[in-house]
Amino acid sequence: MMRTPRPLESLTGKELTRKRSIAGVSTRTLLYLTGTLAARGFEWLLPVVLSKSTDPLWPDPGASIEKRVETDIYGETVRTTQSMIIHKLVACSTAYPKLFVLSPNVRIEKRERRATGWHSYEFTQLDFEVRDASSGSVRTLVESAVSGLVRDLQKSARAELESLGRLRGVKVPETPFRAYDRETLVDRYGEGWEHELPGAIRNPVWVTNIPREFYDFEDPATGKWDNYDLFVPERGEILSGARREWEYSRMASKMARDGVRKENYALILRLAREGRLRPSAGGGIGVERLVSWVVGSRHVGEVQPFPKVPGVVYEL
Ligand code: ASP
Ligand code: MG
């Protein structure tokens, strides 16, 4: 039985030392990834928490949302950020052709997900988007960032990895990563492929063609989705992304098909109708998941200074 991560004030001296070593790895991870993106000409935007429009997280076979947090301010309904995908599409189409943001995501997961060790109801996503990019170019960028990160950490966070017993735990991933169409994995493992895959791989792999939210590009000719998730060995998914829809008729008809309320997406639909949305591709890395994989923590909440484990409400 996995132990639920406990808050700082109840940890032993040894546990606090471990927590601090994980923070050292996390610091170097953030420095490396933000530095890599900035060096490639990305603008670093600051996040927002309250908006009328946020990621619907629907339909997504992986989503398990118990509650969507909505509140009224100044007489209007706003929602806490589930992801900044809508903001990314607007920002990327207008002022910032290459952008990233470290964004707090609030996803009130069903409480059963406490036991997965892979879910928190608040986490930070390193979310990025590139105008006119192809899926392939985004995947190549991610591959070089993830491999480069592990190589960097073996030097920059050597002492921390050693004290966590992980210096040889994570190998520098070989690039390019293999890519599997989801349908191939369903044939091989059945509908539970997501749970089987992490134990069957030694190197990170891509999974493509995953039916989900309206903003991922779905090819009308083939019915295939031009999107991708990155899975790491032993653990699971650490990144979701896609090439995007940008045409009004496609977005509107997908919303109607999925039962997503158009009035919650008025701005992005208006920009699309006016031809002001631009094609793009991007993705978002779950920062705590990435660090959890590197340090080998049993629960992703262990990587968080203030854990947010599904079903548990902490004072901080
Ligand atoms: N960040 C994701 C994306 O870029 C959206 C998500 O959070 O699932 O597609
Ligand atoms: Mg998603």
Image: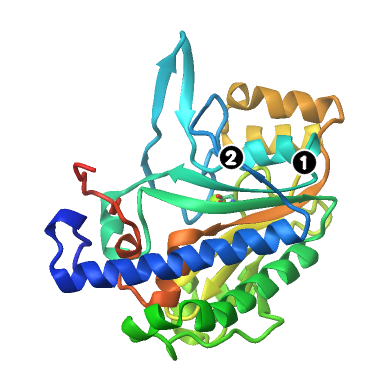
Residue 46's mark? 2
Q: Is residue 105 left or right of residue 126?
A: left
Q: Can you tell which quarter of the image residue 199 is in?
A: bottom left
What percent of the width, then of the height, locates residue 269? Answer: 73, 27
Cα separation, mark 1 vs mark 2, equals 13 Å
Q: Is residue 245 left or right of residue 118?
A: right
Q: What is the secondary structure assignment of the residue under circle 2?
A: loop
Assess disc 1: are there few (<14), some (14-19) or many (≥20) residues with their C-alpha within 10 Å of its C-alpha.
some
Q: Is residue 62 visible?
A: yes
What percent of the width, then of the height, locates residue 265? Answer: 63, 27
Q: Which residue is located at x 32 percent, y 83 percent?
A: 163
Establish if 137 lies above or below 262. Answer: below
Q: State whether label 2 is within 8 Å of ligand 1.
A: no
What percent of the width, then of the height, locates residue 202? Answer: 52, 88
Q: Is residue 287 left or right of residue 256?
A: left
Establish if 240 lies above or below 146. Answer: above
State the residue lying farthest toward the top: 75
The reply to whether the C-beta atoms of the residues labelled 1 and 2 are less than 8 Å apart is no
Residue 96's mark? 1
Q: Which residue is located at x 43 percent, y 87 percent?
A: 167
